[in-house]
Image (tube, helix red, strand yellow):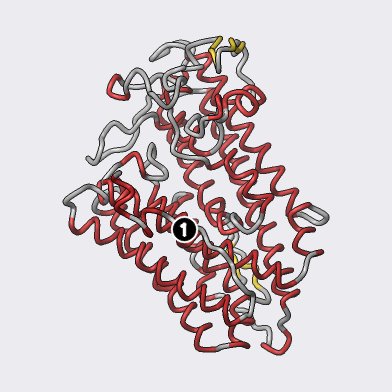
């Protein structure tokens, strides 16, 4: 069993891991304490798998061939599993929101980083760095200023290239920049196949596509940077960390609001809307989250798993151990057992729909094929996941009301709320 298959097997065990704490013993403070403990475990796992990715990249650069390239790709896929389960900590936790763009921003104008196919285009009205290709050019111009890029370092990537010129599409760091460096562009549109970058792009003796030494430098620096960024966030959730302290020292009602804001906003505006419905409306393969590797089905699945395991207060770590404790589901059940059961059922239904979509991606067609205009069956598989997310969001809103948390604003999405605006 390869790494990604292993994590698919163990990552869903938390669906049946319910806390054994008697309802009378559950307090908001205990739920929040378990929430932050699970956050620490998730970010620790994300860091550990990023370090494994870094090691695999080092092996690729030491001996660039198809075997080491595939091993690095598998390490990237494995690293996505725990990270995607952390996304439910976004939206409610300001520290995570301020940091997240450094590691998971998308989509990206990959011409900023490296060579692209002529079909990509030569210029963009929105982005003057659309084809800057820093790997090929030791100096580039940003907002009229010449930037020395002769030495590619993590600092150059993070402080100068990331969102260069104030343009969000200039994504130079994080998982998706690494994904592009490992797979290259997916030039198949809505057809079968992912990116197919050759290992010789990193060879010093048989270099393909020129500038292999600088390309090696970029891949080395960007993977090191991912590890550093995840070290920072793991520290934020460890004992005495800033993110942990905000929740532990704040009002319990504010902590519960943070938890539910993350669940509802990821469920509705971000995942159902921006990541799924928008691509389905447009039929655009550029709107898939892991677009170079064709791993989008797993990213969506593990976002859904992450929402569910926060509600149930349980998380299956990458080594197969389960962390569980007082859960939000227990607090909701104390207030309204029917709503607690409804939300639990909805979360299971959504994960089941995502699992069905992921199975289709592994056995029938990739996600970018599923969202193609006119693909009735593929569209339906994606829409089932969207429908599940929308339905569970309505149940999350009822849970908020049951807990008397007042008004909580969840992220919206034009793709769901005003779909006609997408085409204007």
Residue located 59% across and 13% down the image: 149
Question: For this rendering, which residue is in front, 413 or 93?
Answer: 413
Residue 343 x/y as whole percent: 48, 77
Residue 84 x/y as whole percent: 52, 53
Instruction: Locate residue 242 relative to residue 287 in the image: left or right.
Output: right
Instruction: Locate residue 113 relative to residue 229 in the image: left or right.
Output: left
> Which residue is the site of mark 1?
412
Instruction: Locate residue 190 relative to residue 226 in the image: left or right.
Output: left
Q: In the rendered view, would you say 78 is above or below 261?
A: above
Q: How many marks?
A: 1
Residue 8 x/y as whole percent: 45, 58
Instruction: Locate residue 6 relative to residue 324 in the image: left or right.
Output: left
Q: What is the crowding at mark 1: few (fewer than 14 residues within 10 Å), some, or many (at least 20)?
A: some
Residue located 71% across and 62% down the image: 36
Q: Quadrant where the C terminus lies?
A: top left
Question: For this rendering, which residue is in front, 272 or 126?
Answer: 126
Residue located 41% across and 50% down the image: 275
Q: In the rendered view, would you say 134 is above or below 36?
A: above
**Could you say whether the residue bearing mark 1 is in a helix, strand or loop?**
loop
Residue located 24% across and 53% down the image: 364
Q: In the rendered view, would you say 116 is above or below 190?
A: above
Question: For this rendering, which residue is in front, 413 or 263?
Answer: 413
């Amino acid at each position: 069993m390869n790494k990604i298959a292993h994590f698919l097997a163990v990552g869903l065990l938390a669906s049946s891991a319910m806390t054994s704490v008697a309802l009378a013993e559950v307090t908001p403070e205990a739920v929040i304490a378990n929430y932050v403990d699970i956050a620490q475990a998730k970010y620790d796992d994300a860091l550990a798998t990023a370090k494994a990715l870094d090691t695999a990249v080092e092996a690729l650069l030491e001996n660039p061939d198809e075997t080491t390239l595939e091993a690095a790709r598998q390490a990237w896929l494995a690293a996505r599993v725990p990270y995607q389960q952390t996304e439910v900590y976004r939206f409610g936790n300001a520290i995570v929101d301020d940091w997240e763009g450094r590691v998971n921003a998308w989509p990206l104008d990959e011409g900023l980083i490296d060579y692209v196919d002529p079909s990509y285009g030569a210029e963009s009205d929105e982005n003057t760095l659309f084809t800057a290709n820093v790997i090929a050019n030791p100096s580039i111009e940003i907002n009229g200023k010449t930037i020395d890029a002769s030495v590619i370092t993590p600092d150059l990537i993070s402080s100068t290239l990331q969102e260069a010129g104030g343009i969000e599409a200039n994504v130079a760091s994080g998982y998706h920049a690494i994904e592009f460096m490992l797979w290259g562009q997916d030039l198949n549109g809505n057809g079968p196949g992912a990116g197919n970058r050759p290992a010789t792009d990193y060879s010093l003796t048989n270099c393909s596509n020129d500038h292999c030494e600088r390309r090696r430098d970029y891949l080395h620096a960007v993977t090191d940077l991912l590890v550093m960024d995840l070290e920072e966030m793991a520290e934020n959730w460890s004992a005495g960390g800033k993110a942990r302290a905000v929740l532990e020292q704040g009002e319990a009602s504010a902590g519960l609001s943070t938890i539910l804001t993350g669940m509802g906003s990821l469920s509705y505006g971000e995942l159902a809307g921006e990541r799924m419905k928008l691509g389905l409306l447009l039929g655009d393969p550029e709107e898939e989250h892991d677009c170079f590797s064709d791993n989008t089905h797993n990213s969506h699945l593990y976002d859904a798993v992450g929402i569910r395991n926060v509600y149930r207060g349980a998380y299956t770590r990458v080594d197969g151990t389960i962390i569980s404790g007082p859960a939000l589901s227990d607090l909701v059940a104390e207030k309204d057992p029917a709503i607690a059961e409804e939300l639990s059922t909805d979360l299971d239904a959504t994960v089941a729909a995502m699992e069905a979509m992921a199975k289709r991606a592994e056995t029938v067609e990739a996600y970018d094929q599923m969202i193609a205009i006119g693909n009735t069956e593929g569209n339906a598989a994606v829409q089932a996941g969207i429908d599940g997310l929308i339905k569970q969001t309505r149940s999350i809103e009822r849970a908020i009301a049951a807990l008397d948390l007042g008004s909580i604003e969840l992220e919206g999405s034009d793709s769901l709320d005003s779909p006609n605006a997408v085409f204007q």
